[in-house]
Amino acid sequence: MQREFDIESFIEQRKKTRIVGDLLHEQATDYLATLALLIRPQLVFGEYLQGAPRGSGREAQHAFKEFKSLFEATASAEPFRLIQELDVPLEILSSTPQLYPYEYDMTLAGREQPVRITSPVRWVLGFKGFELQRFRQVIRDPNRSTAELFRFVVHYLMLFYCINRAPGLGRLLLGLRFPVSFEKLADFGDMPFCVIGSLVSSRLPDEGLVLKSTEIAGNGTFEELVDEADVRNMEDAVKERLLKAIDAI
């Protein structure tokens, strides 16, 4: 049975979601700014990148060889179908990490176009200037610029490679309550993306409520709602670990 749409309750949930989402995004962005130096491609690939200082020759060579294999396997497949090779030194236009909305489409009965769903507590990690929304637009454009698509693929794969090869960074972000995962996203084939989450979950209400909300708003977007219980039940992992150690004596 479809629930009755309670506009007052929904507005209150949206306000709480926006407050929690904004605060978490601000905190995650602050942490990323501090950790940015740990994921700079220039430190990994050295002279294989334009303008980068010379690094450890053997390590940089090994890293670039691995990245080249990753690029060739991903870029040549759907939906990219790129045939360009990586020219050395490779040009990297941006190496500043930035959070972009985690989005996906949802098909609802009674609506012709899918609804674009956004998570308030999860984000896709990319480099500044390489917005995920623009990347999706380039892929779908039949008259797309091959050069622009190439740059997007290179920058997102390079960020993935740099984070994936540094497990300590993932453990650090987990300790800061922003776990990192690697996922495939709709519209991007088998390309792996870095996703930053939080200890707060979000969910969708009944489909009927999502449909009613989009009808009232007059658009095709909806944001998941934060689970308030997660916020109220959050525990201090360090405190619990210390208490267990003391109790074990």
Image: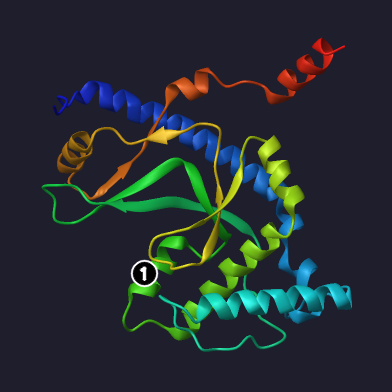
Is 232 on the left or on the right of 221, as rendered? right
Residue nearest the viewer, comparing 16 with 80: 80
Q: Quadrant of residue 11?
A: top left
The x, y position of residue 199, in whole percent, is 55, 32
Which quadrant of the figure contains the C terminus? Answer: top right
Residue nearest the viewer, comparing 163 with 147: 163
Q: Quadrant of residue 207?
A: top left
Which quadrant of the figure contains the N terminus? Answer: top left
Q: Residues within 10 Å of mark 1 (few under 14, many from 20)?
A: few
- Which residue, given by chain and number where applicable, does mark 1 sit on? 137
Q: At numbered mark 1, what does the secondary structure look like: helix, strand or loop?
A: helix
The x, y position of residue 204, in whole percent, is 32, 36
Residue at (72% x, 47% y) in the render: 34
Q: Is residue 54 visible?
A: no
- Residue type (three-letter) at the residue carrying disc 1: Gln
Residue at (69% x, 25% y) in the render: 237
Residue at (87% x, 78% y) in the render: 57
The x, y position of residue 20, in whole percent, is 48, 30
Q: Is residue 167 above or below residue 142?
A: above
Q: Is residue 61 above or below residue 216?
A: below
Q: Is residue 113 above or below residue 70?
A: above
Q: Which residue is at the far left?
A: 110
